[in-house]
Image: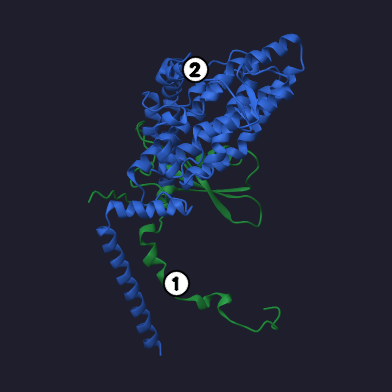
Chain colours: A green, B blue
Amino acid sequence: MNIRITRYYYGDIPEEKGGGAGASADTAADWPLWEVFIRSKQGLDHKHVGSLQAADAKMAIENARDVYTRRSEGISIWVVESKYIHASNPDDAGAFYEPANDKVYRHPTFYDLPDELKHM
Amino acid sequence: MKIQQNYKLTTVSATANNNYLWDKLKKRAMSVQELEKIFQHKVDQEIKIEPKDWMPDAYRKTLVRQISQHAHSEIVGMLPEGNWISRAPSLKRKAILLAKVQDEAGHGLYLYSAVETLGTTRNQTIEDLHSGKAKYSSIFNYPTLTWADIGAIGWLVDGAAILNQVMLCRASYGPYARAMVRICKEESFHQRQGFEILLVLSKGSPEQRAMCQDAINRWWWPSLMMFGPKDGESTHSDQSMTWKIKRKSNDELRQQFVDMIVEQAKILNVTLPDPALKWNAERGHYDFGEIDWVEFWNVVKGNGPCNKQRLEARRKAWTEGAWVRDAAAAHAEKRKARQQDKAA
């Protein structure tokens, strides 16, 4: 019974490992970790592109510009400190998404309709 | 009516809750062997493994070792090229080389972030490089002696790296594969700019042509070494293939590289320093000579021409940059405190 259990409190970064403790004067501590979201063009959603470390939000946005938009990949940047992201647990995925499994009638293909019917 | 609805809702969620608890109980009872079976099944089905999924400890360890080694290579790789930024022959070449070196820093970051998702802190990863515990690609322990070396690095070294990285775009670990996709997109500019440097030199004065050939002579064998030991002697290969971290063997990739480069060398009108290099119609591949494995292991073990210099440069940059990291952290603290004062 030597199952390794790693708990994740935010995003993809394991517990107490992502510099989530916040910036401090102690050189041994990493700067906090930020998740970066980029809107590649007007009309599209911001999409998660990766993460980086920065002392504060302003630096996070500037670093995100330098790292993730060097070839004009974006026109808008969101950053959020990784520790503020709450995530579902993949281990519970079975039960968690179970309510959707027996509701095939939510899909349009569930309804058997005559072929003559057009534009529907 | 309303009561009825509410009643229904509670029953449904109670069932869901039971299932949830049942799942948890089952999980707890599952042996490592069973979990490993589920894991391998996912890998076989080409379902990517994401950071929060269960994975064998050895898989996690292999990834941390491989990805951090890869990240360090990007960062240390900036050193031999940085050597030429101020001496590149024109403003255009300086600007291009600067952009390329900046890309390498970005590639290092993508990979360090991927390591972080496996539960190793950035500081730990960097410390392992500085202490010599972690390795980086041996190719960067060779010196860049002339401007043509920058061309040879782009053509041969980046060319070899790309073959490996294209394969890794399909690695089973999601964050690693995604980082690789991003890197590959940027890397093709690197190889093309290297080839173009050599192309210009190959059409230049006799001195320039000689410089071009000399750089290729020096970088050819170390580039072949980049693919690692022979298949029979590579310790991690089989397991990495089963886990679909790697999808091609060292020798397969090396052969692919040789076949590709021999053809490209004809355009440059240069020779490759291997008398055994010959087309083998039966195999449909080029045969090539034996790598100097004594040299290979020597450089891996830290006795290459620049091993000490590279690590010293990294450590120096880290130590001398400490005040910048401290200052930024202090500045962030101060601004946060000011904002809180204003709010109060």
| Neighbourhood count class around disc 2 (C-alpha, 10 Å): few under 14, some 14–19, many 20 upward | few
Residues at discs 2 and 1 both on one chain: no
Q: Is residue B277 above or below residue A85?
A: above
The residue labelled by disc 1 is A101
- B107 and A75: which is toward the camera: B107
Residue B33 in percent (x, y) is at 30, 52
Residue B67 in percent (x, y) is at 45, 36
| Chain of the residue displaying label 2 | B
- A56 and B291: which is toward the camera: B291
**Residue farthest along the left direction in this orientation:** A1
Residue B40 in percent (x, y) is at 40, 51
Name which residue type carries label 1.
Asn
Q: Tell me which residue sits at (48%, 42%) in the image.
A: B176
Checking the image for residue B105, the label placed there is none
Q: Is residue B273 left or right of residue A8?
A: right
Q: Is residue B251 left or right of residue A99?
A: right
Disc 2 versus disc 1: nearer the observer: 2
Residue B187 in percent (x, y) is at 61, 34
Checking the image for residue B292, the label placed there is 2
Q: For numbered disc 2, what is the local secondary structure?
A: loop
Gap between marks 2 and 1 measured at Cα:
60 Å
- B72 and B262: which is toward the camera: B262
